[in-house]
Amino acid sequence: MLRLLSFISVLSLLISCGGPDEYIVTLQGNTQGTTYKILYVVDQPIRYNEAVDSILFAVDRSMSAWNPHSTLSKVNRGMDSLLDPLFQQVIKRGLQVSQMTNGAFDMTVAPLVNAWGFGSMEKADVDSAYVDSLLGISGYKRLHLLSSGRLHRPDGMQIDVNAIAQGYSVDLVADYLESKGINNYLIEIGGEMRANGTKFGNNSWVVGIDKPMETIQEERFQITLNLDTMSLATSGNYRKFIVDEETGIKYSHTIDPHTGYPVSDRLLSATILSPDCMTADAVATACMVMGLDNAKVWVQEQPEFEAYFIYSDLTGDLQEWWTPGFEKRKR
């Protein structure tokens, strides 16, 4: 999934003092082909770099499509399908989201993602016959996680967890911080976020959602909002795409699991609020697949989610739509 969010303020120091016996610690680095930044409030400036890096390394070793030694890569090569516990959790939740979205989210689109040039392989020569052949080995209803921890699936089926694994990484880091008694934090990995409590002076964590532009603008944020006790994930189609050199046609990186083709819709970005980041990550992708009109209807029937959509109207101008619960968080 494309990562679209940033912190509104950037701390210049790794450790800052907020008040008597109160510190905010900042951890940042690279992971999973992107960056991470974690802020948390403590009464002693304790840093958990090694523990956080260990968590992120474990996710990469389990589910990275670019790591040839990961469990995911081995599964997609047809090797032993015994999944580690992290991968099992992602598959379980992913299949649940697939069911609730009627297949708009589908982890079995990996061959299609690769064919269109958005995965770990070069773009293939795609035609309708080739797409149909790949659809024949796709479909979440054909994927089953057995009690043994192994996957049961058709020969040739491959898995893509890019639209859920980073959100899961955020949740794992949050669980670790809370295990250390840290209840005031903001975690961001590749744009997916989870916040709890407050920062200094009982102030809310403030985050921004980028304008849907191909390049980052100086005034980059479409809106800002207060984020507390909630996760946030955004999916969009305006920065990650390919252009056919012969036809000039621009292809979105979001693949519709039902058709096998890139999504074409007025919806430019979908932001989802959810208690956990793994679910927010997957649902944001599902909304992009559904398209503007269907996503509006669907999300209003799901009380556990709040949504914010940016779309283009019939004249090409940017418009916004949000659920009532999302509006309450806007600044």
Image (cartoon, rainbow, N blue to C red):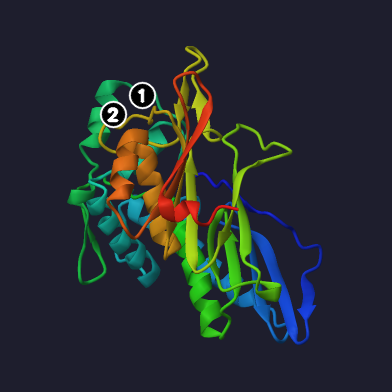
Tell me: 165 left or right of 144: right
- The type of residue carrying mark 2 is Val
Tell me: 267 left or right of 318: left
Task: Tell me, yes or no, whether the two marked residues, 1 and 2, touch with CB atoms within 8 Å.
Answer: yes
Query: Badge 2 local density, few (<14 within 10 Å), some, or many (20+)?
Result: some
313 vs 269, nearest the viewer: 313
Q: Quadrant of residue 297?
A: top left
Q: Quadrant of residue 129?
A: top left
Residue holding disc 2: 131
* Secondary structure under the numbered disc 2 in the rendered image: helix
For image coordinates 26% across by 69% down, the residue present is 149
Tell me: 312 left or right of 98: right
* Secondary structure under the numbered disc 1 in the rendered image: loop
324 vs 240, nearest the viewer: 324
For image coordinates 31% across by 49% down, the residue present is 300
- The type of residue carrying mark 1 is Val
Give how far across and how far down residue 74 sits, in percent. Answer: 38, 56
From what the image shows, is residue 203 above or below residue 309? below
From what the image shows, is residue 39 above or below residue 321? below
Task: Tell me, for residue 126, which label it has, or none.
Answer: 1
Give how far across and how far down residue 190 sits, in percent. Answer: 57, 53
From what the image shows, is residue 11 above or below residue 216? below
